[in-house]
Amino acid sequence: MTSYLSPVQALWVSLFITAFYPIAGKMAVGFISPGMLLFLGALVCFIVCLPWLIKTKQLKELFNFKKAKYLMAVGLFNTALPFLCMFIALLYTTPSNASILNQTELLYSLILTWIFLGERPNKTQLLGSALLLTGVIIILMQNRWTPQWKGDIIVISSVWLYQVGHIFAKKMPKEFSPEFITAGRAFYGALFLIPLTYALTFIGLPIVFKPVLKSFLIILYLGAIFNTFGNMFWYRAIRNMDLSKATAVILSYPVFTYLISVCLGMDKISILQISGLAFAFSGAYLLTRVIRGKH
């Protein structure tokens, strides 16, 4: 499915697809609850991948425990938990804030590497971290003590989950194709989302689904485009090019999210927000340069 694009082309397609997902999450507010949105999106993704699984006779491989354990891990830590937190955050904050603050994942990566691998950060990493933190602080201070601040805090408190998922993703056998990973991630992500969505009802987040055209279009984007092709193109890119280069490109998606959000009236042009974006992007870029240097 993804072989007709070069790794670089696949990366840029994935970037533009990714830029829209915080917008879709915000549009869903009031129409679909976060858990239901993610569950239906994962289900649609699996249905789209199902003909390919059947054609290649890999459907039964989803239940092979030696393979399934990796898919369950990325389904939980790269789909169900972090995106559930992101879409809950979008009940309160804006798409651009959520996408900018999502870059703090790099800080967690640096901290976890230091703690568990003993790799002390160098001067460039410390500078990149300081710039990224400055951008985050600017964003947080702009909305402090407001309902929007609650969403911002949820984002920066949950992005470490991606790093756990990345650990399992890197340990996947080389024969796992982008299509197989995408299908398995969606399948197990959907299974985990069933109890998680029900659990949210106990903390005041009821299951909501309004069967209107807008709801179906959002689910179609999230399931068929973002979860399916966005992931396939991303795995196509990172398995065939330097990971740090791919990360440096994909980290620019908040710029596009911000521009789209402003055009749709979900955000206003703000000097503080632009400053926060500039600091966060500069810090993220420096951190990825260090990773590339190590490779």
Image (cartoon, rainbow, N blue to C red):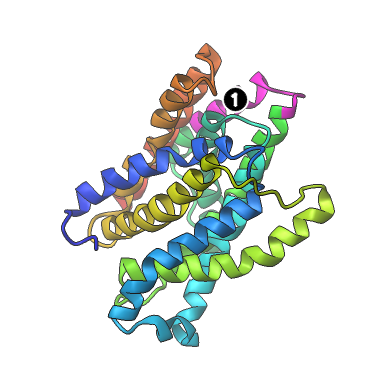
Within 10 Å of disc 1 (Cα), the crowding (few <14, some 14-19, many 20+) is: many
Q: Position of residue 207 (x, y in %)?
A: 72, 52
Query: Which residue occupies 49% across, 18% down?
Result: 275
Quadrant where the N terminus sits is: bottom left
Q: How many marks?
A: 1
**18 relative to 130 in the view: left or right:** left
- What residue type is disc 1 on? Ile
Q: Is residue 139 magenta?
A: yes
Residue 20 on image: x %, y %: 43, 38
Residue labelled with disc 1: 139
**Highlighted magenta segment, given as a residue range:** 130-147
Q: Quadrant location of residue 255?
A: top left
Q: Position of residue 281 (x, y in %)?
A: 42, 31
Point out residue 264 in the picture as x, y percentages from the top left corner: 47, 23
Q: Magenta stretch mostly in which secondary structure? A: helix
> Residue 194 or 6: which is nearer the viewer?
194
- SS class, disc 1: helix
Residue for point 32% across, 84% down: 57
Compared to residue 108, the image places residue 91 above or below, namely above
- Magenta segment includes 185: no
Q: At 54% from the left edge and 24% from the top edge, which residue is drawn?
A: 266
Quadrant of residue 196 within the rendered picture:
bottom right
